[in-house]
Image (cartoon, rainbow, N blue to C red):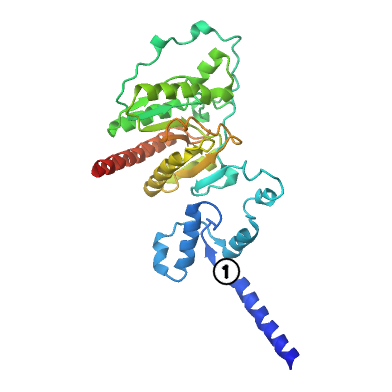
């Protein structure tokens, strides 16, 4: 009798176990798992609640589906089947700490399509010896005033795009490059009432003349940032505009029937005060996604192991690296994105200014 009861109990347990497995495998949740950023945990928790309260579906982000069973695997083992690196994190000390982290993921963003740091231009360093006489004197530096609100500069001045370089194999140019985007962004911000200083300094040219290496680009641009801050006490916004080296299928998004160049916000974490820049990036990303869904690839953090790690953001708590488009995007696509970015920055600035005035 006892044996029959035991067998019956085991059978019931087995049935419940099988049913649970089937249920876990059939339920779909957001692609954002319980593991990761605070926002991803919140979204996943909201989804679980929405299984009982269907009114919550209206506030859930639209994301590709995945099974709850896979998420349970991640919770129990820290292995993400979509990220093969997670198989190695527990085996190789320090690998997790040195891996870039997607702080806020945009549509279609994962570790396989993170921003790619541009290599030095092929003709970089072809000068014989740096000519100190060619260095700009203090009198030749652009005169600055003290009433600018936004400051735009480019640490990688020669980053360009294949459609702009007339068939060259190297997407870099001294004439037609990412500075065109900085100029347009400045103009669009000015149109929206934000007085903007666009720094025309050619950082790569300065490196060559001083005999410095391409990897010292941020050291060189730091001089410009410090000078701008010293002479413009009203500065509230800073943007270091770059382009990604990824290809067009990663960096392009169609919105309302028109192609846009996607962008990425990069926050350096190799300094103690990066939290404010992260908060700033998160706000811009949220505004951009609300107005232009899918245009942002998200917010990425970078430490010393993935790049410069600081990007001059330790100097100013509203300073972001923004990667606009990739090597294949044309000027029309890029300009659409710059205009959208200017709109969002303006909405952020005037919203913050109005809020500050209310609190006075």
Location of residue 84 in the rendering, given as x and y in whole percent from the top left corner:
66, 50
**How many numbered badges does the structure rendering display?**
1
Is residue 4 shown above or below 334? below
Asked whether, in this view, residue 315 is left or right of residue 82, the answer is left
Please state, as top left, top right, bottom left or bottom right, where the N terminus lies in the image. Answer: bottom right
Residue at label 1?
A: 26
Is residue 201 shown above or below 51? above
The residue at 28%/44% (across/down) is: 355
Asked whether, in this view, residue 1 is left or right of residue 115, the answer is right
| Residue 256 seen from this side | no
The residue at 28%/34% (across/down) is: 192
Q: Nearer the viewer, residue 204 or 227?
A: 227
Location of residue 306 in the rendering, given as x and y in whole percent from the top left corner:
59, 36
Q: Sort mark 1 into few (<14), some (14-19) or many (20+) by Cα contacts within 10 Å.
A: few
Is residue 69 shown above or below 18? above
Name the quadrant containing residue 169: top right
Name the quadrant containing residue 136: top left
Location of residue 340 in the rendering, given as x and y in whole percent from the top left corner:
37, 39
The residue at 71%/46% (across/down) is: 92
The residue at 54%/52% (across/down) is: 36
Name the quadrant containing residue 196: top left
Asked whether, in this view, residue 328 is left or right of residue 18, the answer is left
Tell which residue pokes out farthest to the top in this image: 133
| Residue 297 seen from this side | yes
Location of residue 66 in the rendering, given as x and y in whole percent from the top left corner:
56, 60
């Amino acid at each position: 009798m006892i044996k029959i009861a035991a067998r019956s109990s085991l059978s019931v347990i087995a049935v419940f176990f099988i049913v649970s497995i089937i249920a876990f495998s059939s339920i779909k949740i957001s692609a954002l798992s319980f593991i990761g950023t605070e926002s991803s945990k919140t979204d996943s928790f909201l989804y679980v609640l929405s299984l009982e309260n269907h009114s919550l579906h209206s506030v859930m982000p639209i994301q590709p589906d995945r099974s709850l069973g896979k998420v349970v695997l991640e919770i129990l083992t820290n292995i993400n089947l979509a990220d093969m690196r997670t198989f190695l994190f527990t085996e190789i000390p320090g690998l997790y700490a040195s891996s870039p982290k997607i702080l806020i993921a945009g549509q279609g963003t994962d570790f396989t399509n993170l921003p790619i740091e541009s290599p030095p231009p092929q003709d970089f360093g072809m000068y014989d010896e740096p000519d100190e006489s060619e260095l700009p004197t203090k009198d030749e530096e652009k005169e600055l005033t003290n009433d600018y609100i936004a400051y735009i500069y480019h640490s990688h001045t020669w980053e360009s795009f294949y459609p702009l370089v007339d068939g060259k194999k190297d997407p870099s140019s001294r004439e037609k490059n990412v500075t065109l985007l900085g100029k347009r962004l400045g103009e669009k911000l000015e149109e929206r009432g934000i007085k903007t200083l666009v720094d025309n300094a050619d950082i790569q040219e300065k490196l060559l003349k001083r005999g410095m290496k391409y990897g010292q680009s941020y050291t060189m641009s730091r001089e410009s940032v410090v000078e701008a801050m010293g002479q413009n006490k009203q500065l509230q916004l800073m943007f270091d505009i770059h382009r990604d080296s990824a290809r067009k299928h990663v960096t392009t998004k169609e919105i309302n029937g028109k192609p846009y160049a996607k962008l990425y916000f990069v926050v350096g974490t190799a300094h103690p005060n990066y939290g404010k820049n992260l908060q700033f990036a998160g706000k811009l990303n949220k505004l951009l996604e609300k107005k232009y869904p899918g245009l942002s690839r998200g917010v990425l953090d970078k430490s010393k192991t993935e790049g410069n790690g600081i990007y001059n953001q330790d100097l100013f708590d509203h300073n972001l690296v923004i990667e606009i488009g990739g090597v294949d995007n044309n000027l029309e696509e890029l300009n659409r994105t710059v205009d959208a970015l200017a709109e969002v920055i303006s909405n952020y600035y005037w919203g913050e200014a109005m809020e500050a005035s209310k609190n006075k």
